[in-house]
Amino acid sequence: MNLNTNYKNLQQSYLFSTIGKKVADFQKTNPALPIIKLGIGDVTRPLCPAVVNAMKKACDEMGKAESFRGYGPEQGYGFLKEAILNYYKEKGVSLELDEIFVSDGAKSDVGNILDLFDKDNTVLVPDPVYPVYVDTNIMDGRNIVYMNANEENGFLPMPDEAVKAGLIYLCSPNNPTGAVYTKDQLKAWVDYAIDNHAIILFDAAYEAFVRDSSLPRSIFEIEGAKKCAIEFCSFSKTAGFTGTRCGYTVVPLELESDGLSLNKMWLRRQTTKFNGVNYIVQRGAEAVFSPEGRKQIQENIDGYMENAKVIVATMKKLGIFYTGGENSPYIWLKCPEGMKSWDFFDYLLTKLSINGTPGAGFGENGEGFFRLTAFGDPEQTKEAMRRLENADIYKK
């Protein structure tokens, strides 16, 4: 028996597992100090009533012989795909139902999509980067080239014609930096991908947080993108489905390479390796797009973005360099006094009882930076920023 030795090239543990252990150890020895958690990007607001009611109704249907459903279509029920299609129309994007694939979340699809691509492809990823993009390709043994995202370019790297790659990961609004590409910037990436016969894997999980109407919320708002891009989206942050699990991926019908249709390949992959998202969850996801659901979910998003405003105000007050916050639930800030990311993590945890995410966990360029999220409780977020403003490290 031979094992996949590429696993030897992975870090020993997933970033957030390491953070979780550190926080748990601190809580164990300091049980009287409640920790304000602004680290992992998990939502705190419950599913909205429209979603819950739709799921309850679906549960009732599953308990009756005349409305019970067994195996559903692996690519998603038509009612949910129709709702997603109409949502894209609002962005000025025209899709076919067969281009939409419902899944159990964007994270799964971002990893599973690699089944379509040869292991000899060079992969281009930004640094800092969401660890899943890197780790899934390391598991397959692909060559990874890092794009230099930094303070000078606002953590929005642009194409380098000297670098050739078959796969390109873009995330906008970005995790972890919160930075958002403009339409002109994405057009440059689309042109680069077409010229180099490359595929853009575009992560739009945070598109619902974009407030500036001039900024794109889908790669398919860009001319030519259907010839070179696959888009992943999620209900996790938009509608609080982090524990409910549902997302979708758009694979254009016109996306082809080497005489093969990537849409047909993904359909074949999903029908072979995936049994689809359960009916109850898909009915809940459909309710996300109902008028009532849209209103309720927007209230939740507005609440998170109010938290972001509180954090951004503190960054400005203290004169801290940051990105994100205005069109993203993530705020990416520069550590004080030239501190290393994990040192700042330890300082916030042990001195201020605040949990965040060290930038070094997202790549070399993340060293010296730190990520806070707006997904916390409003009052706790305000308290965390009060503690930060009064921290001795910012009074030197």
Image (cartoon, rainbow, N blue to C red):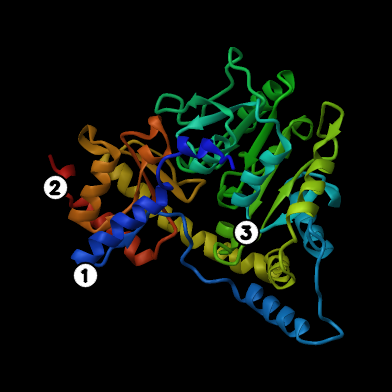
Q: Residue at point 34% right, 33% down?
A: 367
Q: For marks 2 and 1, give the one nearer the viewer.
A: 1
- Between the residue at mark 2 and the residue at mark 1, the CA separation in whole angstroms equals 24 Å
Q: Residue 31: which disc? A: 1
Please state which amino acid type lies under the numbered disc 1.
Pro
**Mark 2 vs 3, N-terminal side:** 3
Q: For marks 2 and 3, give the one nearer the viewer.
A: 3
111 relative to 56, above or below? above
Residue for badge 3: 235
Q: Residue at point 29% right, 39% down?
A: 341
Q: Quadrant of residue 20?
A: bottom left
Q: Which quadrant is home to the C terminus?
A: top left
Q: Which quadrant is home to the N terminus?
A: top right
Q: Residue at point 62% right, 44% down?
A: 111
Residue for badge 2: 392
Asked if disc 2 and disc 3 are in contact, CB closer than 8 Å, the reply is no
Q: Callout 1: 10 Å neighbours few (<14), some, many (20+)?
A: few
Q: Is residue 266 visible?
A: yes
Element at label 2: helix
Q: Quadrant of residue 168?
A: top right
Instruction: Using the image as rendered, state which of residue 97 and residue 311 is in the foreground.
Output: 97
Please state which amino acid type lies under the numbered disc 2.
Asp
**Mark 1 vs 3, N-terminal side:** 1
